[in-house]
Amino acid sequence: MASKHDQAAERLATTLGTTYNRGQGPDVQTKDQVTETETVNTIPDAARQLRGFNKPVYVQGADPAATKKALERYEKSTIGVRNSQGKIVKQSTRKRK
């Protein structure tokens, strides 16, 4: 059985027409944005994993508790937040260069 993390990342990748990267690097990446899916315990790691990308970046909460924690953690940053269904609940303000 797939974890909540894997289920959320797979769902988002399918929605965006790309694949879920289970290895090193961001979980879901398109030419226009990057998303890292996190559980409530790994939310703080997301900023490090999204560092260096010059396009909109998002943290996707694997469940409602993770989404809430991500909203609190990245409230005053350029990092956006998605819920477990992939809906943007906080827009990324990081611009493409």
Image: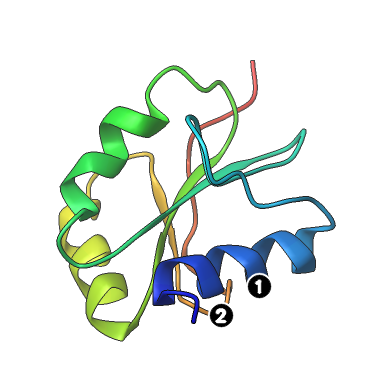
Which residue is depicted at the point 17% across and 63% down?
72
Instruction: Tell me the quarter of the picture where residue 60 sits.
Output: bottom left
The correct choice, above or below, for 61 with respect to 76 in the image is below
Question: 62 and 81: which one is in front?
Answer: 62
Instruction: Tell me the quarter of the picture where residue 10 sits.
Output: bottom right
Q: Position of residue 55 (x, y in %)?
A: 60, 29
Q: Amino acid at mark 1?
A: Arg
Q: Residues within 10 Å of mark 2 (few under 14, many from 20)?
A: some
Identify the secondary structure beneath mark 2: loop
Q: Position of residue 83 (x, y in %)?
A: 45, 75
The correct choice, above or below, for 36 with respect to 62 in the image is above
Residue receiving disc 1: 11
Q: Amino acid at mark 2?
A: Gln
Residue receiving disc 2: 85
The reply to whether discs 1 and 2 touch (Cβ–Cβ < 8 Å) is yes
Locate residue 73 relative to residue 83 in the image: left or right.
left
Which residue is depicted at the point 77% across and 33% down?
31
